[in-house]
Image (cartoon, rainbow, N blue to C red):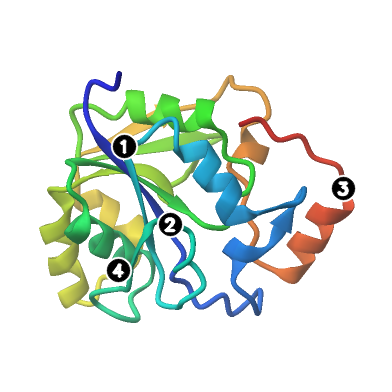
Amino acid sequence: MKAEKITGVILAGGKNSRMGTDKGLLMVDGKKIIERIIAALKPVVDEIIIVSNGNNYNNTGYKVYRDIIKECGPMGGIHTALSFSNTEKNLVVSCDMPFLNTETLKFIAENSNICEIAIPEHNKITEPLCAVYSSVCRNKFSQLIARGEWKLRDSLKYFNVKTILFENKSGIEKIFSNINTKEEYKNLTENEYEYTS
């Protein structure tokens, strides 16, 4: 039983301008990416919500919310999620990360105490779109958006951030990899990958 309730948030509200199609609906190893992420999240969280400005996820069986504040990127999506979430902790994941697995997400969630934001780091790369955000971040995000400070990475200096190191975990770069372009998707589907749920 989980010690503290946590909401899983899937950000699927991007414009997908580089891909040209909704990334969460792309097929990887016979499953849509959104389905793979849901499967990885379910054992870790108490509820799953999706933030999307379209209608592609209305039949997933999960609550879908549109951005409260439009056109301000991932920060707007996180702000929306925190506005509708019923839990203090929120595990936020982008919809274009097909190789996330339950073990990794559980490790992040379990190490997210005593901070406002808990962000994984591997090889000096941080992953703010696979991180735990406390509900107390909502008002500060609202203020930053109002000031036009929409860049998520730049905003981290305003929060109490905990870094979760993954330096010694095997295959971690692949686990956190995401798909942004048609070329990346083509390379992905032309190669054989393992997926651990």
What residue would you read off at disc 3? 191
Give the crowd class for mark 1: few <14, some 14-19, many >=20 residues within 10 Å: some
> For numbered disc 3, what is the local secondary structure?
loop
Amino acid on which the number 4 mark rests in the picture: Gly
Q: Are marks 1 and 4 in contact (CB under 8 Å)?
A: no
What residue would you read off at disc 4? 76
Give the percent coordinates (x, y) of residue 43: 44, 30
Q: State the CA–CA distance, disc 2 to disc 3.
A: 31 Å
Of 8 and 71, nearer the camera is 8
Q: State the CA–CA distance, disc 3 to disc 1.
A: 34 Å
Residue at 25% from the left image edge and 65% from the top image edge:
80
What residue would you read off at disc 2? 61
Amino acid on which the number 2 mark rests in the picture: Gly
Give the crowd class for mark 4: few <14, some 14-19, many >=20 residues within 10 Å: many
Name the side, left or right, on which 163 lies relative to 188. Answer: left
What residue would you read off at disc 1? 46
> For numbered disc 1, what is the local secondary structure?
loop
Query: Which numbered mark, 2 or 3, is in the foreground of this view?
Result: 2
Q: Which mark is residue 168?
A: none
Amino acid on which the number 1 mark rests in the picture: Asp
Q: Are marks 2 and 3 in contact (CB under 8 Å)?
A: no
Q: State the CA–CA distance, disc 4 to disc 3.
A: 34 Å
Give the percent coordinates (x, y) of residue 62: 39, 56
